[in-house]
Amino acid sequence: MRGRFGFFRLPLIWRVPLAVSVLMVLVSAVITERVLDRLGSIQETYLQSIANSYLDGVTASISPSVLREDSWEIFDALERLRPVNTAIVPVETIVTTPSGSILAATDPLRYPSLEKMDDQHIEQFPDRQIRIESDDGLAYLERDIVYQDTTIGRIYTIFDARLLLAERRDVLSTLILTNAGLTVLLVLVGFMTVRRMIRPMQTLESHMIEAAEGKATRIGVSPQTSGNSETRRLFMAYNSLLDADEERRELSTRLAEEEKLASLGRLSSVMAHEINNPLGGLLNAVDTLKKHGADAGVRKSSLDLLQRGLQGIGEVVRAALATYRPSRQARPLSLSDFHDAKMLLSPELRSRGQALELLLECEDGFACNCPADPVRQAVINLLLNASAASPDGADLFLWALKREDSLMIEVGDRGPGFPLDSLSLLTGPAPKNLPEGKGLGLWVVRQITDEIGAGLAVEPRPGGGSIVRITLDSDAFVEINHAA
Amino acid sequence: MSQDRRSGFAVALSRRRFIAGGACVPLAFGSSKASRAGLPAIRFGLTPVFLNNDIQLLDALKLYLEAATGHSVDLVTRRTYQEVTSLLVSGQLDAAWICGYPYIQYRDDLELVAIPAWNGKPYYQSYLIVAADRDAETVLDLRGDIHAFSDPDSNSGFLVTRTLMFEHGLDPETFFRKTLFTYGHRNVIRAVASSLAQSGSVDGYVWEVMLELEPALVSQTRVLRRSKWLGFPPIATSRKMAGTEKALALQEALVDMGSSPQGRKVLDLLRLTGFEMPQEKAFEGIAGMVARLRGVL
């Protein structure tokens, strides 16, 4: 098993050529074995046919003598019928009665007439089927002598098959040498070819690994690039993929920025409205001061009016500046961020008769290691979405609860509930593409929470509506700290 | 060795065939010999003596006899003595080279034509042979053997041993484990040499000649017992053919075989010194054995 794992640990550029080489060796071995097996069968058939011819002749010649149990006639016939110019020569032939008593043999000294044929020796002769003993090169065959449907005797013949076996050995050695030579050659060629063929795959693999590690680089493709056009197309496709990914990233960033600007635009109009509202009062106060500035009472009340009006305008401006900063400073989140959010939303809420309840269960001077800007932006987006989804006069809430190891922020609305695609956008798998049309704000929320490692959950609100919950745990804090 | 000799003989034979077929024949055998044309063929039977498979010997013998007698000669060979003897007795053969035993058995129907002489005498012996490395010393040591006989009508290849057993009060069917008839003296030697049979009865003349021709085979056997000298297998004719022109011509050709080069070649192949005129007394020994076994066989 260790070897197997060792093999699988090898780089692809070695593994594939090695596997191909092993397969070629296996194929060669199988072919060699098949050829030898077939040759063996052919030789056995050939041997069997020669042996049968010999035994046919002997049987026909000696049958009358076997009937008479005439040992001399049988012996004489065996001597005369012994072939000499064949590939196999009978070295011993023994003729017995059906009961195994020897009538005559080509070697009477070894097989004396009238003696019983040794049972052990008889077992060497399979019935009618030739058996070749590769150790001594002898082949054994037994045949019944049948006369008028009666078995009158048996012939046991041992053939010298060494010539055939030598021929088989020659073929074997030639085949093995040739196959081994060809296999080595083919394995070398195959190894080099396959190695060359999969080299682009290795290049692609290494680039993809780098891409997965966030260090994607383009593959250099030039007309001189090695490999065929298919490889070049593959490389170019990979490069196109990288380009497309890069473009998508840029587009996402840009859209996020645009969304932020769009939010800001809407806020700016609110802000202009907020500034414009007290502006008439302020100008009136200035006129009053011009005309009746000598009067201390009028002056004080006008200046108070001016101060409150300018403070209101100042609040609006500060909140707007806090929402959009050209460079994101890692300012920690504070309670004022939630107040700002409510303040920024208040004109919108007021215009629709909606009420926003701010519940901050945190100590005063609350500060956590969370960066303020992304959380603040996410909260504003959620509030804008809640306001838009809820009917006029609805009661909304923004709740922030600080615990030892986490911060939980909830935004509640009175809307009809999130449609499925919006729900999926918030809590489903990380969205790869920007939503078309509506939902951009929610997409930004999801991007922000993913970015800072915050949890996002949606649940129904008692009495109707939905609650969106952002949970920042201590791990996120640490990561955010690092990010800071 | 024997093959070389046979090849040499084949060349001589071809030359003789040429001479026999040409005008030299009358010169060689005299003008008294009649031309072969128009004369009836001599049907000459041969029992398996020792070179019964040697086609060249048969060719040489035929050529010689045809040239010497002026008759065409048909050599008739049969596997067993009995077949040849039957053909001879029934008159289907003019003459035949048979064994002394059938001659004695059919003495009333047969007439001797000539007797071969081996080493100058018309006698030979029967040998009891065993494997060369065997310890046996007497016939009694052969109990339980598979014994190879040549032919049931052979003197040296059966009768002599059978008589010996009889004289010892033994029955071959029980004394030996099994008996074989190989129908050829050379086969008896082969059977014993190969150990198919542990002992055998063989023509002593054949054994001696084969020892010279096929020493590798014959030296695997040794002679355990030699019989007394007995009449050599003779050439005989049926009684009714005796004295006919063909029988006389054949007798003359055989007896004169040593006087011509072609005849001497045949004698050399047969390892005989010649053929002699018939002598009845040569077969007294065989006749005695037959008489002793009368009623037994």
Image (spheres, coloured by chain):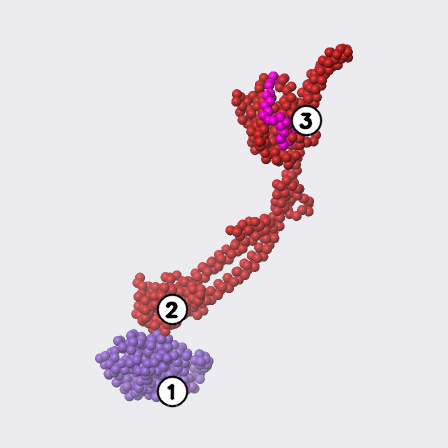
Q: What chain does mark 3 sit on?
A: A
User: Would you say A133 lies left or right of B232 here?
Assistant: right
Vertical relation: A287 (above or below) B29: above
Q: Residue B169: give x, y in percent of width and height.
A: 24, 81
Q: Nearer the viewer, residue A260 or A331?
A: A331
Secondary element type, mark 1: loop
What amino acid type should be assigned to the residue bearing mark 3? Answer: Ala
Q: In the visual, does B284 lie left or right of A190?
A: left
Task: Tell me if I can see residue A403 in this picture.
Answer: yes
Q: Quadrant of the C terminus of chain B?
A: bottom left
**Residue under label 3:** A322
Contact, CB < 8 Å: mark 2 with mark 3?
Answer: no
Residue A393, compared with residue A365, is above or below; it is above
Q: Residue shown at 67%/23% (left/top)?
A: A267
Q: Chain of mark 1?
A: B
Q: Residues within 10 Å of mark 2 (few under 14, many from 20)?
A: many
Q: Amino acid at mark 1?
A: Thr
* Residue B13 placement (x, y as % from top left): 44, 81
**Magenta residues (range):** A352-378
CA separation in Å, label 1 and label 3: 154 Å
| Number of the label disc, if any, that sits on residue B47 | none
Residue drawn at point x = 33 percent, y = 77 percent: B198
Residue at (36% x, 64% y) in the render: A123
Alpha carbons under labels 2 and 3: distance apart:
117 Å
Residue tagged by mark 2?
A: A93
In front here: A327 or A192? A327
Mark 3 closeness class: few <14, some 14–19, many ≥20 residues within 10 Å: some
Of labels 1 and 3, the one closer to you:
3
